[in-house]
Amino acid sequence: MKKDKFVHSLRIQLFPDSLIEERTEVLIDFCKKYGFNDVMLMINAEEFNFGHITIEEATPWVEKLKGVREALLDAGICVSVNNWIEMGHLARGRKLKPGQNFTTMVDYNGLRDELVACPIDTEWQDYFCEYASFLVRELEPDYFWIEDDFRYHNHAPLTFGGCFCEKHIALFNSILGTSYTREEFVQRAFAPGKPTRERKVWLDTERRSIVDLAERITKAIKAASPKTEVALMSSSPENHCIEARDWNGLLGALAQGGDKLNRIHLPSYLETMGKTYIHNFNRVSMAIRHFSGDDTKVWPEVENGTPNMMRKSPRYLRFHMEGSLPLVLDGMTYSINGFCGNGAVEELGYGKEVKRLDPYLNAVRDRNIRFSSLSGVTVPVFEDVCYKLDIKNGFGDLTTSLFQAGAYIASLGLSFKYSSERRYRNETIALLSDSVHCFTDKEIIDIFENNSVILDGSVASILCERGLSYLIGAESVHEIPLETPTYAYEMLAENRKILGINGYRSTIRGEMGRYFDASYGENSGVKVLTKVYSASGEITANGFAEGNNFLVLPYMVDNKHDNQFCELRRLLIKDFVLKHSGKVAISEYTGIYPYLYAEEDQTHIMVTNALLDDFNSIVLDTKGLNVNKMSEIGHDGITKEVPFTLEDGKLTVNAKLPMMSCVTLIIE
C-alpha cells in the first residue's frame, strides 16, 4: 500500500500486563509528538519470547494488543505486526513444547538444535501458517513482518550454514538418486576443489525451499487478512549468499502482487566510528538494496540494542538516518527502546531527532530517485557466487568476500554502483576478490577488451592460473609472505609528491592483507607505479602496475585491511578512475562518500560525511557532469539554489557539510 509520506515505523513490544494501558497512552503521545506514523507491534520477542508460541499462549497477548491497535488507529497511526521469529534465531535454552513434533535444524557435524525448526518440515509449516493467520485475522495489520531468522544460517550453537536433518538428507538423496548418510553427503558436498554435484543440489534446495516457504506463508496470511502485506527483514549479504538466496524470487513470493518491502539491516548495533559504520553500510546495506531492485520499498532498521554500553547518542541516531539516504528510502524502522516492554522512552532523546529530520527525509523521497541510476566505478556482485567458489580448507571458504569490493572502492572516496550484469561496455570495472570466479574466460576477455579494469593481486594470480595473464601483460604472479624484513614498505617508482612529500612511503606490514608480486614482460607496455622495499632499502618486488586500460593493486581486497586505505594507494586508484571513467564523483578525503545518481532528466549527488570535521564547502573531482545549476535540499525540506564552480572537473559547492551528516544536491 502506497504511503503518502516518509514512514517512521516504531518497532516496539508492549507486554500484556497491568501497565499496558499506561504504556499505550505514552506510546501514542510519543508518536504524535515526534511524527512516528507507523507502529510495529512486537509479540513473543527477545525477553518475552516463548519459543514457538502457541495460539493459546498468544491469545491473552493478542486480546490486549487489539485495544492498542484501536487506540493507534484512532490517533491516525498505522499498525504492523512482527512475531520476532519464524524458524527461530537461536534456542537460548528454549525447547519445543509438548505436541510440537517439529523436525529441528541439524548442522553438518550432526548437532541438532532444540528449538530452531527445519524450513522444509511440513508440521512446523502448518503450525506457523495457522499461527500467523491467527495474528493477522485478529489484528488486521497493514504489514506482517518476516524476521531475519528466515534463513538457513546463523543459528548458534549450530555450526554456521545449512540444515542436514534427516528430511534434508532424504531430499538430497531423492534428487541425486543416492543413499548417502549425512556424513557421506557432507564429505562430497564440501570436498576440496571445484563445486561438486552434491554441493549444487544443496544450494539449489536451499534457494528454492526459502522461496516456496515464503509463498506458502504469504498465501495463508492473505487468506486470513487480504489487506495485510508481507514484508521482509534481511541482514548480511555474505551470509545470504551461502544459501544462494534468490532475492527477486523471495521478495516476489512475499509480495504476491502487492508491496515488495525490505527492512534492510543497518550494520551498527554498537556506536562505532563513522568511517567504520559507512564501510559496513556499503558492504551490507547497499548490496542488499541492489539485489532488492527499484520496485522494492526500503525501510532500513536502526537498532539501539542490548550490546551497547549504555546507549547510542541521539546524534548518532541522526547519522544513521541521514547516512541511510543513499539506499533511496520510503521509510525508516526504529528499534530504539529495547524489547523489555518499557514502551516509548522519551527521555532517551531519539524522538527529537526523528522530528527534526522528517522534512528533509520527505523532500528527498519526493525526488523519486531511482537506486539503479547510481553511477561511478562498477562493482560486479552475484547472489549465486557460492556456486562458483572452490573449497580449500573447508565449509568456511564459501563465505564470500565479494562485497568487500564495494566497501573498499567507496571508502577511497569514489562513487560506485553494484551490478549483476555479465557484459559491460565503456565502464570502469572493479574486478576484485571473488568476483572473477563468477565470469567465464570469454566474459573476462570481453570485460578487458571493452572496459577499463581495476583488479587486485589475487585476481591477477587467478588470471595466470586460467591462462589469461596476457590480458595484463604478466609473466608470473605469486603471493609473497608478509611480516618479514624482505617486504617492509611500498614507494612510488617515479618522482611525485603526495601530501607535499617526495618519496612517499606506505607500509605493507600489519593490516595489509595478502600481497602479490607480478613480473611483467619488457614489451608489455605495463608501467610499474610503485616498488616494494626491504627494511634495508633494497627493491624486492613490484607494487601497483598500470596498463593501457587496467590497474593492478598488488594486494587482495578480501576484508577491511586498514593499511590498504592509505593516501598513496587512494591517489593511484583515483588517478586511474578519473582517466578512464565516463561519469564519476570523487571526494577529497577518505571518510567523505559521494553517491551519484545520474538519470536522463535529473542528477543527484548525496554526500555523506562520516568524519568528526565540519566543512564549509563540498569539493569533488568529477567526470562526465554538465552543471548549469546546483541546488541543495535543506534539512528543513526546502530546496535552495547554491553557488558552485566547475573547473577542469573539480566541482566546488558552496554548501556546508557538517560532521556525521548527508547532504543531497540536485544538478540541473
Image (spheres, rainbow, N blue to C red):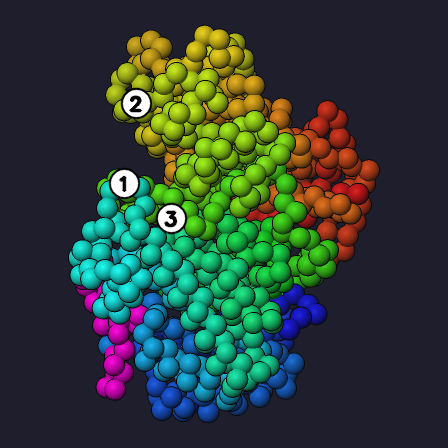
Measured as percent of width and height from the top left, residue 396 is found at 28, 47
The numbered dot on residue 480 is 2
The numbered dot on residue 407 is none
Q: Residues within 10 Å of mark 3 (few under 14, many from 20)?
A: many
Which secondary structure, mark 3?
helix
Q: Amino acid at mark 2?
A: Ile
Which secondary structure, mark 2?
strand
Measured as percent of width and height from the top left, residue 469 is found at 42, 22
Q: Mark 1 — residue?
A: 193
From the viewer's perspective, is 510 left or right of 285?
left
On screen, residue 434 above or below 36: above
Kindly check if marks 3 and 2 are in contact, taking CB atoms under 8 A apart as contact: no
Image quarter of residue 668 = top right
Q: Residue most toward the right?
A: 628
Image quarter of residue 613 = top right
Measured as percent of width and height from the top left, residue 363 is found at 72, 58
| Residue at (29, 59) in percent of width and height | 176
Q: CA distance from mark 3 to mark 2?
A: 27 Å
Q: Amino acid at mark 3?
A: Cys
Measured as percent of width and height from the top left, residue 343 is found at 47, 77
Residue 569 appears in the picture as rendered: yes
Seen from the viewer's position, the closer of residues 296 and 320 is: 296
Residue 147 appears in the picture as rendered: no
On screen, residue 361 above or below 562: below
Q: CA distance from mark 3 to mark 1?
A: 13 Å
Residue 667: say if magenta.
no
